[in-house]
Amino acid sequence: MPGMVLFGRRWAIASDDLVFPGFFELFLRVLWWIGVLTLYVMHRKKLDCAGGVLLSSYLIVLMVLLAVVICTVSAIVCVSMKGTICNPGPRKSMSKLLYIRLALFLPEMVWASLGAAWVTEGVQCDRTVVNGIVATVVVSWIIIAATVVTIIIVFDPLGGKMAPYSSAGPSHPDSNDSSQLLNGLKTAATSVWETRIKFLCCCIGKDDHTRVAFSSTAELFSTYFSDTDLVPSDIAAGLALLHQQQDNVSNSQEPSEVISHSPGDSQEADLDAELENCHHYMQFAAAAYGWPLYIYRNPFTGLCKIGGDCCRSRTTEYDLVGGDQLNCHFSSILQTTRLQYRDFIHISFHDKVYELPFLVALDHRKEAVVVAVRGTMSLQDILTDLSAESESLHLEAEVQDCVAHKGIAQAARYIYRRLINDGILSQAFSVAPEYRLVVVGHSLGAGAAALLAIMLRSSYPQVRAYAFSPPRGLLSKSLYEYSKDFIVSLVLGKDVIPRLSVTNLEDLKKRILRVIAHSNKPKYKILLQGCWYELFGGNPDNFPTELDGGDQGDLTQPLLGEQSLLTHWSPAYSSSSDSPLDSPPKYPPLYPPGRIIHLEEEGNSGRFGCWAAARYRARWSHEAEFSKILIGPKMLTDHMPDILMRALDSMVADRAACLSCPGQGVSNTDVV
């Protein structure tokens, strides 16, 4: 931090990023030097042969080159360990050392080429010596190739535009020159991101929806990443520090700060009923994922149970069920839901951008027509997720400011058209007219299910929706309030997706900038201690992040301030306020759907939850509790559908066991 400027352009690597790569190269180079020295000392008498003089010269010069490289890399490592992330002053000689290191690749390449030529000339020396020299030549070319790959990885396509600009510091937004430069930089960044996304998603089609999704995703990434001078390792260090800081704050909170009033009997009964509903309908949300999730949850028996149906040819009865690729999927759906074939009205695994797979079934136990929408499982789904700009909804409900996540709204609208225009719901209710409509989904499917329920409510006033781990950036404030009457969301632990929105990402970026600016440790120490903390835990007090008077005397200028981490002035950035950030116009603040049940883990079952069975408590929560992204080792695993199903199984079993002790059940449930 900031990104190094070499050859007149910025690179996606900082001067304090070379500690670990340097140590790795030193380890290889020293081993290599010892091997070459051993080969030469033990077999130099066998070089008295035709061509032996050339091979002897090759080994001697190679040892000298290796010694020079080892000294240079050692100096790079030592310099890279100095200073802090925002104090690059002690590392100002790094660029010169890197120029020297890169210059040494020229004689290495020349000497590796000569060694290859001399070995292939058919020298008449001892075979052991020749094989050893062949190995040194191969190692030379492997290291050279690895260096080229590393240069390609750290190459920043925008470096030529950002280097002179970032060196000048943040610009004032009222300057015409700055405005033109910012617009040019943003256009270039959007183009670069769109090229990257098209390359990564080259296997999917090129229809209109896909092209729109490419543009929306590229604009999102360029908006979020183009205004900071952060390299990837800075973000990793910032996340490590934030996790420790977050745990430190949590440990220091008084109980009165986090405990709210106790629930009444009606609220407790309502929570019990909704938890039982969530436990039941999560089976449908999981079934919508098809055979991949079923095999993952049943690695030893799953394939045996559905394998026969995978190979079975379709019979005429399958014409009653719409959709694609049903064989393995349909068998896994039957196993997960425990329903019969005749209970399914429609199953579709048609998957495109803004078009999600879904199923419609008759749930006789709950007397409901269930629509289950699949969550993210493909590149097309990821593009739907990342189309995060807002879109207005045209609803018959009397709700103002009907705005929602564009990609998910498009997906919900597609399913709505299929259900209504193709007569799928009409067919379902003709079979079971007394049943009510329930829409469920997990992750992306949860967001689509919530919006679908909102769209269907005018036609089906009794509709209910259960959104499992829904994205936060989904509904406008008015739609969020409107959805509380008929939508229930379920969130597990520190799951990042129910806290994920453009506004929250901007807040996370602000917090990363702040904690990095106040860090008093070298980056390599932060990363090492952060890895130890994530794996084995520890006392977060042992990881200070604030500069104190004693440390400031050891720092060498320049010391970058918090705002200096921005490549230009950002309207969404405020260094003096902890209030939520203002989002760009295309990304207004959005909220999760409905009332929220939060399952929180009690005690500590291990850093990754695999050492002991976890126990959970449930409570009604307010959306404000999910207004910040929490960092932790379970922020991703808590989102997995199998983990959520396991938590629900445990939660429902524990609460059923406590029916005879209502006092205990009440004490485990808080309402906000």
Image (cartoon, rainbow, N blue to C red):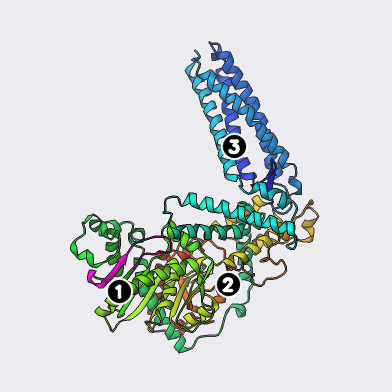
Start-end of magenta stretch: 341-358
User: Mark 1 or 3 closer to N-term?
Assistant: 3
Q: Seen from this angle, which residue lies furthest right?
A: 553
Give the residue at mark 1: 423
Q: Where is 340 relative to 325, above or below?
A: below
For residue 304, which quarter of the picture?
Answer: bottom left
Q: Where is 224 relative to 283, above or below?
A: above
Q: Which mark is residue 27?
A: 3
- For label 1, the SS is loop
- For label 3, the SS is helix
Residue nearest the observer in this picture, 99 or 136: 99
346 within the magenta span: yes
Any part of residue 301 in sight: no
Give the residue type at disc 2: Pro
34 within the magenta span: no
Give the residue at mark 2: 589
Direction from residue 520 to residue 433 in the image, left or right: left
Q: Where is 174 relative to 65, above or below?
A: below
Give the residue type at disc 1: Gly
